[in-house]
Image: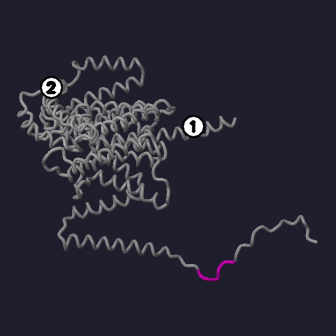
Amino acid sequence: MADSRMPRQTSAPPPMPSQVPQYSYAWVLYVLAAVVALGMAYAIYQLHYSYGQAPHRIIKILVGVTVFLIAFFRPYVAMHAWLLALPLGEFLPATGIPGVNGPNLIFIILLLSWVVPRIFSRERIFTRTRLSVPIAVFIGVLTLSLIKAVVFPPSAGSYPAIVMVKNLWNSALGLAVYYVVVNTVVSREQMKNLLVTFGAGATVGAIIAIQQFIGLASHKRVVGALGDVNDLGAYFAVCASMLGGVFLASGAFSALKRVAIWVAAAFTTIGVVLPKSRGALVGFACGLGVLALSVSKRAFVFFLIVLALSPLWAPGFVKDRMAETRVDSVEAEIMGDPTDKLDPSASVRLRIWGVVLRETVRTPLWGMGYSTIPFLTYREIGRSFSAHSLYIATFGEAGLIGIAALFWLLLSCVRSGLELLRRATRKLDRGIAVGFLGATAALLVANVFGERFMNMSIAGTYFFLAGLVDRCIHFIRTEDAPRTAEEMTS
């Protein structure tokens, strides 16, 4: 009789080693790598000797291929590269592809590297957040508005659809960066690194503006690497407001990163002043007001006193610029400083608004169509102007539906910032919330007298920050969930 105390065998004995020799096929990878390297070398040889391509072009091609591979297989690295490229749009080499510049190309690769692997692995691509639907709706409304302008133009004449599509494409990419950030950033440490890179890119942009300012006469206005004085000012107003909030929470960073944030905050503040954009200056003042109010009521009162005394301490060229409200004639404005062509006097701006509103009343629900205002002003005034107000432009081009979608999006951004500020228990979260609310105030005010929201560099910067805000909220909710479950079971 078998002893019941004997341990029962629960698994089969390990199999005997196979008598068939085992071979490694790792050498195939080395052979393939050698074949690819030889193929690239042969392609370079043919480009140089057979097709007469200059060496610098070949180097650009190699750099482009390398960036593509790194960006696709390392999306996090691509995001850093995109942040560095964003403020240098006009300085980066052209791709030769319509509608695709340096930042656009990096972002497209970044978008593919996020979406394609998830499709093949059948993972969820999007995370539902407060801004995900408003952004999609706003882009959709603008797209329908563009289709309306092409199919049913508001007046006789041809409207270059390719130009309109290109404008919408650049703007949509700036808005879409939100989806990448909110779905790929996985930790607060990554946020810190991205904020340092964001500050480094803005610092480089400020240094370029400072170099231009030093080389120009005092009455000239710098365009920086963005190619437009008012866009440059609004970009720095957003960056400086955000970095100001992060500066208040710089204790959350290591010593080296803290210094990088301080330097970036200082340089971007200088960058706000150099383009002499009144909208940017007023917007930045509002952003600073939000930062001061977040510190204390006393700090806010002190800020108001310093602002009231600005005529005593502000640089002369800033005071002169703020005092300008009109020019002697429209002709002088049109034929004057070429860097100032998109900054008409107050009287011309009011005339543009009157023309836009008068035409929009005829189709108040859908508006005249995307990118039609420059053609309208050319017909009515004799020169192509933008509306010089985001809100007037949106109402004129997309009607009541468009302005409702825009206000929904902007209100959702404010609500995200306020929710993070209310929930924040960490220095980093509070700094991001305060900085984002300051950047929102700066952007909202700067767009009263300009259309800075749809610029690729500005929209990309702002919605990158919006993605960080909603990602912080997600982290906080995830951290609170276990405690809530524990309280319910106790």
Q: Are marks 1 and 2 in contact (CB under 8 Å)?
A: no
Residues 108 and 58: in front is 108
Residue 262, x across and y down, in percent: 36, 34
- Position of 92 with respect to 246 (left or right) is left
Work out which quarter of the rendered image holds the N terminus and state it: bottom right
Please determine whether, in this image, residue 171 is positioned above or below residue 240.
below
**Separation (CA) of disc 1 from disc 2:** 52 Å
Residues 342 and 21: in front is 342
Residue 400, x across and y down, in percent: 29, 36
* Span shown in magenta: 16-21
The residue at the point 47 percent across, 39 percent down is 472
The residue at the point 45 percent across, 59 percent down is 119
In the rendered image, which residue does mark 1 sit on?
Answer: 480
Please determine whether, in this image, residue 25 is positioned above or below residue 72.
below
Q: Amino acid at mark 1?
A: Asp
- Position of 320 with respect to 112 (left or right) is left
Residues 116 and 18: in front is 116
In the rendered image, which residue does mark 2 sit on?
Answer: 325
